[in-house]
Amino acid sequence: MSLNLRTLDDIDLQNKKVFLRVDFNIPINNGVVGDCTRIEASLPTIREIRQKGGRIALFSHLGRPNGCVNPKYSLKPLIKVLEEYFPNTPIVFKEGDYIQNPENFWQNTDENTIILAENIRFYEDEEKNDIGFAKKLAQLADIMVNDAFATCHRSHASIVAITQFLPSFAGRLLESELTSLYHFYIQGKQPFMAMIGGAKISSKIEVLKKIIPKIQILGIGGGMANTFLLAQGYFIGKSLAESGQISIAKDILQQCQKLNKKVILPIDVVVAEELSPNTKVTIKNIDELSENDCIFDIGPKTIALLKNALNESKTLLWNGPLGAFETKPFDQGTHQFAQYATLLTKEKKITSITGGGDSVAALASLGLEKDFSYVSTGGGAFLEWIEGRIMPGLEVLFKNNPASCAILF
Ligand code: ADP
Ligand code: MG
């Protein structure tokens, strides 16, 4: 499938200074770097540009410093990480107001050097997609390569406005996210099951609406299942729910019924009075809840139903943990469902797709993230893609935008 994207295949990189926008927004706590999956995902792009004679300056954001310099959000701890991935390569860190003197930016570097620029969100104009700021960024390099799929849903200067001033191309990670989404999602084999969980229905409504026509089975878990249970008239005690979304939950259930889609909601749940590791935990059928009960996970009968549904499916799209997995023992629903999904994937009985910040964190904590057919690095961008939105950062990288971008959905 040809994407019609401008990629690394479309440029001569020899001696070119490359503004490489990556998403290195990874957990860094007190200088200790956490999961490096996103850095590893961009290594092929970095290596290819270097092999083809390009010189690299890496630009990323980290967290939400709101346009202020804040050491808590510094990318400095990544110098060591990059030095490990690129031995014998000088990693030069650019801090301070590095856009003011573009002529100094590449000083004391050679073709072997990798520049790492400090958090681009330390400049307040970044999130404003400011044209003047983008023009200054563009003066730092000859071409722009965007490998930050996870930031493509943001209209920010280093993602969007900069493309007005530099020839711009998709990096290999961005390209592979789009080809994988096309291959695994658009061309996913039927029967197609979607498993949607997470805390809130409000953040997943657009995803739900978009996927219903495509799928045969919809599993609903996590905190958002509670609002659906309310919509069905169940008493849910003190469980987290969004009373303002009950009518939407009813609409979604009606739409599924009309289109003859199977919906699986929890029939039993794990309840406690509070979310803490040593709390007293009970498993109850969904019609047995009392005043002080809070639902924090799906129960074993529900897990069995979901596993059966997986047996009937050829493709699984999963977003959103099925319980408050960060606190044991409420990780069981997520754990067991993930284990079964990866087992069927290994046996080549299903193709499995997952994405979403917390979903991937949950899988990583179980050591199962590598066993899915495809795990998106996209987080919010992954969800927006599923929603069918044309993302501002993608639109500017297509050859005949935006029409050719739209055919992807
Ligand atoms: P993602 O980032 O993968 O899209 P969400 O952000 O929608 O996922 O949801 C993740 C959060 O949902 C997790 O922090 C998890 O603790 C929470 N969650 C899931 N089920 C419950 C529940 N029953 N009660 C409270 N929180 C829940
Ligand atoms: Mg989340």
Image (spheres, grey):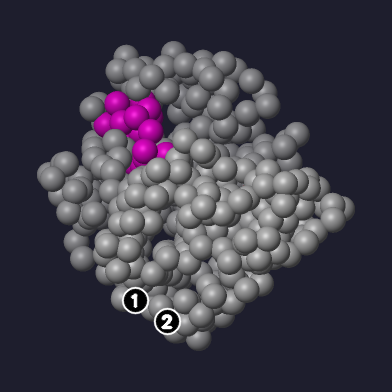
Image quadrant of residue 381? top left
Mark 2 surroundings: few (<14), some (14-19) or many (≥20) residues within 10 A: some
Rate crowding at label 1 as few (under 14), some (14 to 19) or many (20 or more) other CA atoms within 10 Å. Answer: some
Q: Quadrant of the N terminus?
A: bottom left
Q: What is the distance, in whole Å, between disc 1 and disc 2 at their CAs? A: 7 Å
Which residue is at 42% across, 49% downward? 249
The spot of residue 230 in percent (x, y) is 53, 49
The quadrant of the image that shows the C terminus is bottom left
In percent of width and height, residue 108 lies at: 52, 29
Mark sitting earlier along the chain (1/2): 1
Asked if one can make out residue 319 in the rendered structure from this viewpoint, the answer is no
Report the side of 107 relative to 87 (left or right): left
Q: What residue is pinned by disc 2?
A: 312
Magenta stretch bounds: 143-163
Instruction: Give SS at disc 1.
Output: loop
Task: Say if mark 1 contacts mark 2, CB within 8 Å.
Answer: yes
| Residue that label 1 marks | 191
Three-letter code for the amino acid on which mark 1 is drawn: Pro
Q: Amino acid at mark 2?
A: Glu
Residue 231 coordinates in the image, percent (x, y) = 47, 50
Dot 2: what SS? loop
Q: Residue at x 51, y 38 (%)?
A: 243
Q: Vertically, is 30 above or below 358?
A: above
Is residue 148 on the magenta stretch?
yes
